[in-house]
Amino acid sequence: MESLRQNLAAVRERIARAAEGAGRDQAGITLLAVTKIFPAAAIQEAYDLGLREFGENYVQEFEGKAAQVGGLAGARFHLIGHLQSNKSKKAVELFRVIQTVDSARLARRLNEALVRPGPPVADLAIGPAGESPLDVMLEVKLSGEDAKSGAEPAELPALIEAVRGCQNLRLTGLMTMPPWSDDSEASRPYFRRLRELAEQHGLTGLSMGMSHDLETAIEEGATCVRVGTALFGKRKKV
Ligand SMILES: *Cc1c(COP(=O)(O)O)cnc(C)c1O
C-alpha cells in the first residue's frame, strides 16, 4: 500500500508537470490505472487511494476480479485489450468503457448486446449499472504491421459512421498504442497522428501514453493516460 501510495504521488506529479509544461489544465487528463495481471486486491488498494478509472485487458481475467471489485461505487472499468465480438455480451456487463472498438461488426455486436430482450420498454437501452449509452473509443493502428489490432486510419470514416449509427454507443474518441520503444520520443509521431485524426473527425478524447511515455502523450494532447507499471510495478509474465 505504501509503495502504491508513493508511486501514485509520483505519477500524479509527472502528469501535473507535463500538463503545466504543455500549458494544459490537468483536470482534462484522466489517469487510467491499468491492473491487468494484478489481483483484485490491487484494484481495491488503488480505489482506497482515490483512483476510480481502471483499465483491464482481458474479459475473462476481469470477470474473475469483478466479483470482488465490480460493485465499488463510482469505479469505472475500461476494456483496453482487443475484444473478440463473440465476447461482446460479457464485455458490456463488465465494462463501462470499451476503448478498443476496431470494426463496424464489433460496434454492432456491442450495440445489440446492450438492448435487453423483453417487453417494449427495451426501446430505452439499458447498459451496465442501468446507465446508457456505453462509451466507446476506436483503437487505431498507426504502426503498420507491428500492431495486431486496431482499425487502419483509412477505415475510420466508415467506422465512425457505423458507431454513430449505434444508438446505445457513445463515441468519445480514439485510442492507440505505438510500437514499444524505451525512448519516449519515438512515440511522439504516433501520438501526433492520432490527435490529427481525432481533429479531422471532430473527436475530443485521446487515449494515449503509458508508464514510459505519458509526458510525450500529454504534450501531444492525451486526455487519458493508461498507466500500469509506474503504479503497480513490473507485471509477472503470463
Ligand atoms: C498494459 C497496457 C498499458 C499499461 O502499460 P504500462 O507500460 O505498464 O504502463 C497501457 N495500455 C495498454 C493497451 C496496455 O495493454
Image (spheres, rainbow, N blue to C red):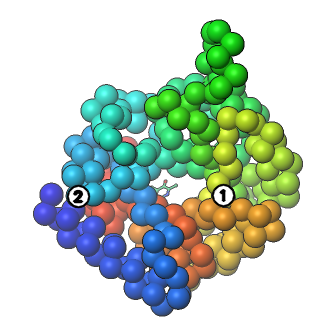
Q: Percent from the top left, x then y, of residue 60?
A: 44, 31
Q: How many marks?
A: 2
> Which residue is at 78% across, 45% downward?
164
Query: Which residue, given by chain and number where applicable, does mark 1 sit on?
Result: 173
Can you tell which quarter of the image residue 40 is in?
A: top left
Look at mark 2 in the image and give the residue it sits on.
49
Residue 91 place in picture, x, y as percent: 53, 32
Q: Nearer the viewer, residue 161 or 43?
A: 161
Q: Quadrant of residue 124?
A: top right
**Reading the chain from its start, which is encountered first: label 1 or label 2?**
2
- Give SS at disc 1: strand
Q: Where in the figure is residue 120, as x and y percent of width and height?
A: 69, 13
Q: Is residue 3 left or right of residue 209?
A: left
The amino acid sitting under disc 1 is Gly
Residue at image point 35% right, 62% down: 229
Type of the residue with mark 2: Leu
